[in-house]
Image (cartoon, helix red, strand yellow):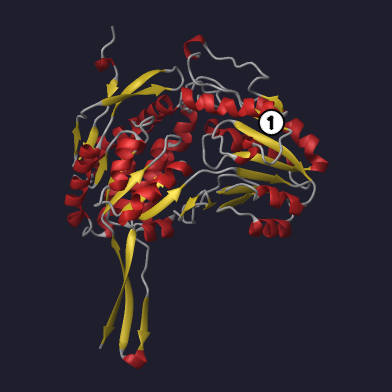
């Protein structure tokens, strides 16, 4: 019989050292359905110890110069890059994504997050005004807040965890971070390099565990004044409720139901190639993925034919297959949820053009217990359908015709979410008109997922509160103070 020690057993990282947990939960390899590692099932006590360590480190770290913090962060980025392949293999096994995606997207971006904020922290300026008639001068200063609670999701594990840790510590805060219990390995691996990079003990603490136990303990801790969360809208609502008695500062990056609007003058070949990628990258498990495609009726049939053909070429395979376009979904439960949306669509009379229930999934025998699903294209849905209104967060997209610009805007805005949107047209005037009216925090025209980290990231409506980016993250992770001096 296999013993528990046959699996990698993670430990919390508190006060600069690894600390064994009192109890553990299983984390699975999505590509095989087998246990990958044991993850701490942290509780109030363990979260409290991490907060205490962060509090103790704050007085010293917050007085370090921006240049000194920048130097340490660049060293950490070097260490991640030096071990890129090791991180990529672990991220793929832990999350189900292809090794290629982890190698080219997740891990390079994780290192770049530290480099970006290590640089940007050196270039922020504050305001100064004079009131000569009162012999007064006013100026602002920005100071770190204290212990930041960071909760990151399972879809882009190290990528989104570092997107939170980097600006928080760059600004002089200390952190207690909780990665998803389903994808904890790369966060644990990064902890091994913190001391080597020169990060003082207690500046970065990682506690592993579930949202209801570890996450809630962090959100409810009175000594954690700022919370940054990426995840579902439902969980965010609970965070708002639980943190309200403490008047905590919140940044919430939530779900999306992102539309692509394809006008009749679009470059169809480029549009199809990019929209397949925007619909199914990372198994459709990106909050920015396209899940509703509105196509002008005059080109609808042509677009649909090309789109379905291109989707069928999007290869689903075991994550280490270098020819794979898509790996496995995160969990058995999530796979069942995504498949259930396709069943609901069929029950409503929709047509499945390719993918689930239509095509055959070919997976090697060693991976047949994994959580794989073909990219799926649905037509014939009404706007009120759950597949058109709810975030599926999987490789499913719906294609719908429209006639007029006004109709496309109305349909695109007709959901509770407002994270991202894509416009496909060669008409610059139309681009400006439509972009102005779309209720979304990010709007791409003739492209997808082109990101300048200097610019704000975040959504409207149920897609979140606040923005992240160079200036926005700096403002979120600091408090502004106005000083007036009469002379």
Residue at the bottom extreme, as displayed: 133
Label 1: few (<14), some or many (≥20) within 10 Å? many
Residue 465 is left or right of residue 144, and the answer is right
Q: Is residue 309 above or below residue 286?
A: above
Task: Name the spot of residue 54 as percent of width and height, x first.
Answer: 21, 48
Given residues 407 and 261, the one toward you in this image is: 407
Q: Is residue 43 above or below residue 475?
A: above
Residue displayed at 73% across by 39% down? 400
How many labels, in total?
1
Residue displayed at 33% across by 80% down? 138
**Secondary structure under the numbered disc 1 in the rendered image:** strand
Say which quarter of the image contains residue 66. Answer: bottom left
| Residue ID for mark 1 | 378
Given residues 149 and 78, the one toward you in this image is: 149
**Which quarter of the rendering shows the N terminus?**
top left
Task: Name the spot of residue 55 as percent of width and height, x first.
Answer: 20, 51
Residue displayed at 29% across by 80% down? 484
**Which quarter of the rendering shows the C terminus?**
bottom left
Q: Is residue 327 visible?
A: no
Residue 86 is left or right of residue 353, and the answer is left
Q: Is residue 173 visible?
A: yes
Given residues 207 and 410, the one toward you in this image is: 410
Residue displayed at 53% across by 24% down? 336
Task: Name the spot of residue 21 as percent of width and height, x first.
Answer: 21, 30
Q: Is residue 356 above or below residue 435?
A: above
Residue 141 is left or right of residue 356, and the answer is left
Task: Name the spot of residue 200 as percent of width and height, x first.
Answer: 19, 47
Residue at the right extreme, as displayed: 298
């Amino acid at each position: 019989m296999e013993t528990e020690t046959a699996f990698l057993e993670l430990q919390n990282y508190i006060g600069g050292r690894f600390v064994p947990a009192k109890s553990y939960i299983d984390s699975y390899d999505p590509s095989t359905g087998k246990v990958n590692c044991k993850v701490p099932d942290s509780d109030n006590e363990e979260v409290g110890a991490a907060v205490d360590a962060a509090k103790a480190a704050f007085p010293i770290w917050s007085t370090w110069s921006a240049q000194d913090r920048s130097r340490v962060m660049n060293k950490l980025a070097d260490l991640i890059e030096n071990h890129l392949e090791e991180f990529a293999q672990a991220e793929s096994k832990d999350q189900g994504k292809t090794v290629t995606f982890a190698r080219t997207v997740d891990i390079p971006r994780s290192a770049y997050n530290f480099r970006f904020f290590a640089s940007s922290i050196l270039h922020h300026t504050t305001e100064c005004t004079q009131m000569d008639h009162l012999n007064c001068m006013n100026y602002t200063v920005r100071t770190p807040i204290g212990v930041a609670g960071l909760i990151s999701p399972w879809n882009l594990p190290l990528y989104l965890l570092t997107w939170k840790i980097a600006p928080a510590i760059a600004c002089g805060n200390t952190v207690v971070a909780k990665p998803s219990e389903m994808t904890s390995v790369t966060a644990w691996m990064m902890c091994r390099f913190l001391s080597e990079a020169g990060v003082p003990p207690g500046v970065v603490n990682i506690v592993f565990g579930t949202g209801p136990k570890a996450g809630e303990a962090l959100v409810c801790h009175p000594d954690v004044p700022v919370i940054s969360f990426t995840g579902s809208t439902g969980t965010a609502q609970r965070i708002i409720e639980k943190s309200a008695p403490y008047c905590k500062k919140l940044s919430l990056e939530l779900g999306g139901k992102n539309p692509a609007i394809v006008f009749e003058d679009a470059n169809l070949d480029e549009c199809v190639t990019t929209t397949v990628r925007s619909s199914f990258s990372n198994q459709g498990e990106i909050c920015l993925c396209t899940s509703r495609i509105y196509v002008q009726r005059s080109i609808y049939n042509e677009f649909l034919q090309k789109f379905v053909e291109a989707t069928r070429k999007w290869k689903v395979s075991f994550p280490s297959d270098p020819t794979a376009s898509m790996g496995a979904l995160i969990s058995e439960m999530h796979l069942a949820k995504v498949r259930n949306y396709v069943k609901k669509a069929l029950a409503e009379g929709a047509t499945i053009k390719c993918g689930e229930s239509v095509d055959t999934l070919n997976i090697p025998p060693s991976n047949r217990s994994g959580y794989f699903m073909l990219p799926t294209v649905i037509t014939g849905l009404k706007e009120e359908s759950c597949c058109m209104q709810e975030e599926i967060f999987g490789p499913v997209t719906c294609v719908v015709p429209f006639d007029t610009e006004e109709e496309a805007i109305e349909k695109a805005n007709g959901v509770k979410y407002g994270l991202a949107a894509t416009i496909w047209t060669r008409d610059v005037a139309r681009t400006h008109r439509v972009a102005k009216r779309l209720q979304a925090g990010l709007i791409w025209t003739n492209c997808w997922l082109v990101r300048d980290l200097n610019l704000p990231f975040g959504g409207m409506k149920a897609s979140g509160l606040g923005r992240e980016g160079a200036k926005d993250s700096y403002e979120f992770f600091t408090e502004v103070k106005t000083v007036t001096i009469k002379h």
